[in-house]
Amino acid sequence: MNKLKSHTDSHRRNRVLLKIASLVLVTGVLFFSLTLSSCKIYSFNQGRIPDSIKTIKINYIENKAQYVNPQLSPQLTDRLRQKILNQTRLTQTNNTSDAHYEISGSITSYTVTTAGISNQQTATNRLTVGAKITLINHLEPLVSGKNPRDINVSRNFDFDARYSLAQAEAELTDKIISNLVDEIFNNIFSDW
């Protein structure tokens, strides 16, 4: 009899645990769905580009940081241009009078600081790269703070302190460009 009661109690506990797990799963899926819908996630094929916007001029992103990585400006400009042209319906123009959107900007910071210390020696360095991008909508009136719109982005990249800055740059440049391009693109074309 005890064996039967123990088996029944165990079966009851398992059913209760299964119901709780199902409830947690449903709640998690519901929460995740609501979170995504409130962030207005889009496929970045079109982002949030008004129908009236058809052309874009992407100016060279200058390097105005105190330390200049000579690869950064041309690669950042080129990769941003590629991402916008490949993932939006916009067409490029080199003429400001034909541009509906115009992007310009500069790399504003490129600094190395200590990020971690071990045994009283620097173990990790942090490279911080920042840029200021300006987006002008030529189809809208110029209104301070709204058009043109300034977008400031900054990313940190940690590297082993045994590496020189040149060694770290060789390893990190592609990641730096990719992260900055994604952040700039998302700030321009999404509604987060």
Image: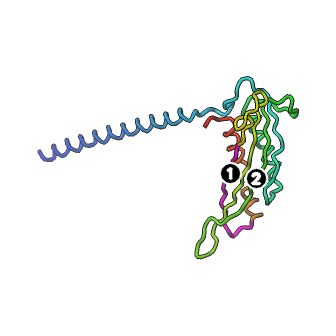
Drawn side of residue 57 relative to residue 44, left or right? right
**Total numbered labels:** 2
Helix, strand or loop: magenta stretch = strand
The disc, 2 or 1, on the residue closer to the chain's N-terminal end is 2
The quadrant of the rendering that contains the C terminus is: top right
Q: Residue at x 79, y 48 (%)?
A: 106
x and y percent of residue 127 in the render?
69, 60
Report the amino acid beneath label 1: Ser
Q: Residue at x 36, y 41 (%)?
A: 21
Residue 72 percent coordinates (x, y): 79, 52
Chain part drawn in magenta = 151-164
Q: Nearer the viewer, residue 61 or 132?
A: 132
Check if mark 2's residue and mark 1's residue have beta carbons within 8 Å: no
**Quick one: 125 or 109, which is closer to the camera?**
109
Expressed as whole percent of the image width and height from the top left, the position of residue 32 reads 48, 37
Say which residue label 1 marks.
Answer: 154
| Magenta-colored stretch includes residue 157 | yes
Q: Is residue 3 left or right of residue 93?
A: left
Q: Quarter of the image holding residue 94?
A: top right
